[in-house]
Image (tube, rainbow, N blue to C red):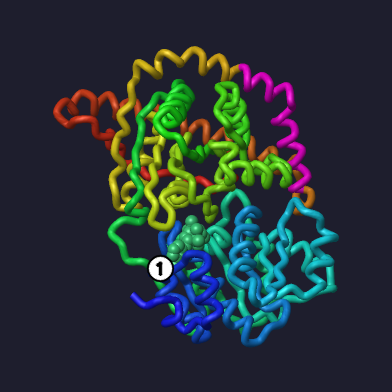
Amino acid sequence: MGGFAELGLSSWLVEQCRQLGLKQPTPVQLGCIPAILEGRDCLGCAKTGSGKTAAFVLPILQKLSEDPYGIFCLVLTPTRELAYQIAEQFRVLGKPLGLKDCIIVGGMDMVAQALELSRKPHVVIATPGRLADHLRSSNTFHIKKIRFLVMDEADRLLEQGCTDFTADLETILAAVPAQRQTLLFSATLTDTLRELQGLATNQPFFWEAQAPVRTVEQLDQRYLLVPEKVKDAYLVHLVQSFQDKHEDWSIIIFTNTCKTCQILCMMLRKFNFPTVALHSMMKQKERFSALAKFKSSIYRILIATDVASRGLDIPTVQVVINHNTPGLPKIYIHRVGRTARAGRQGQAITLVTQYDIHLVHAIEEQIKKQLEELPVEEAEVLQILTQVNVVRRECEIKLEAAHFDEKKEINKRKQLILEGRDPDLEAKRRAELAKIKQKNRRFKEKVGQALQRQQKAGRAGRGRQLPRLQRRPQAQPECP
Ligand SMILES: Nc1ncnc2c1ncn2[C@@H]1O[C@H](COP(=O)(O)OP(=O)(O)OP(=O)(O)O)[C@@H](O)[C@H]1O
Ligand SMILES: [Mg+2]
């Protein structure tokens, strides 16, 4: 395999790679860097942790060194923490250039950001919402001469999940020049390929890693079938056993809502596990601080919503636990990709309740691999069951006293007003939607129970396989 020099990169960049311990290019870097250096648009789809960031950072730095000006490159990414991580890669690899970068994300001081933008940084790394706000409200900077537009986690930026970037992307795309190089990267590009191809029209080069399985080979993927009511006891048991068996350990636990995330964080802390939370109801400073404490291993457990599911590169993470089964295979792929990065080993454990079995089948179908059951000593879980349930209830009461739900409601109303929508009308719509969902869920539960009864009767010789329910998952937005 050739080194970085053979990809057409200058010697100073090859030296930067060497200093960072990047000796050989990864396949996505081998595939994409020469095409980007040739001036082509690029769509790169490769597994999590395979080095997609350097695949766009390196050729951009090379081109910048040939013709330096600001603003040369705009990188868009769905989350604030990821924007900081990408900026760090630019900074480290671009050190000899004296690279000036600027991070434009929500939750931070807008005036300071405007000032930084007006100083013409070489690279701007932004989340779409805040950058669009600056474009709408200020004329002290422009992005009409950028040479590169990068969208990291491009499929997430284009899909209409819980955070919908459509309007902000329209504002941004109207402000960038038609003559530019567009680079789109993700581990899951294929669903949104058609929309993405509309953005990359300059001799687009599509690179996709060919592999029989869509998740990383070094990842040991397990499921644990647990009744909904004892899920937390299993979680505590898993964390405890992992702590007992390992000296140096780090775990990320994913949950489906901010409230569950907060409650479980409080609960795990009550059991003396060094835990920090990361979700969108936290202030930005708290979010950065939690992540920094986790990265430096001061805290060993990060409990997060899907705000942490994409892109974050924390090499020490050995285990990912899904407290809820992800509603979409794509979300599963990104969540479990927080471990087993860059050739390391890792384990992913998904807690599956009786209602989520069809979701596991959809995941298995997409990733082209069957999850294996994780053996657990049920008697040990039963011993802690009452204690865990009592502690959880105490945490719920404490959180209710802190008016968590009200704060969330106020935040939501503020956001809707900012978007020019009527919060009362939206609340009415939401209530109706919730009613329909509840009805659907009840119906699903009934069907599930009936099918399970049938299968139990006829399953005697099939071992401990997950029962097969042939139903597709409902589309569930990626809601951080
Ligand atoms: N050529 C290389 N050799 C060794 N390690 C590398 C190389 N390129 C990148 N890495 C390291 O691999 C890790 C993962 O890289 P990166 O975050 O770019 O992955 P990714 O493909 O963007 O993953 P995700 O889909 O989760 O965003 C980083 O720690 C990075 O420093
Ligand atoms: Mg990435």
- Quadrant where the C terminus sits is top right
Q: Nearer the viewer, residue 265 or 472?
A: 265
> Looking at the picture, how far across and down is residue 154, in whole percent?
54, 64
Three-letter code for the amino acid on which mark 1 is drawn: Thr
Q: Quadrant of residue 118?
A: bottom right
User: Is residue 404 found inside the magenta-colored segment of the image?
Assistant: yes
Q: Is residue 24 left or right of residue 304?
A: left
Q: Quadrant of residue 148?
A: bottom right
> Looking at the picture, how far across and down is residue 11, in whole percent?
52, 82
Q: Residues within 10 Å of mark 1 (few under 14, many from 20)?
A: some
Identify the residue shown where x is 72% and y is 66%.
102
Q: Is residue 341 left or right of residue 72?
A: left
> Looking at the picture, how far across and down is residue 395, in whole percent?
63, 21
Residue on which disc 1 sits: 26
Q: Quadrant of residue 462?
A: top left
User: Is residue 299 found inside the magenta-colored segment of the image?
Assistant: no
Per the picture, the main secondary structure of the magenta-coloured stretch is helix
Identify the residue shown where x is 51% and y is 83%.
37
Q: Is residue 281 left or right of residue 241?
A: right
What's drawn in magenta, residue-wise? 394-416
Q: Residue furthest left?
A: 461
The answer to whether residue 191 shows anywhere in this view is no
SS under mark 1: loop
Identify the residue shown where x is 34% and y is 51%.
218
Is 5 situated above or below 279?
below
The answer to whether residue 35 shows anywhere in this view is yes
- Quadrant where the N terminus sits is bottom left
Is 268 situated above or below 126?
above
| Disc 1 within 8 angstroms of ligand 1 (CB) | yes
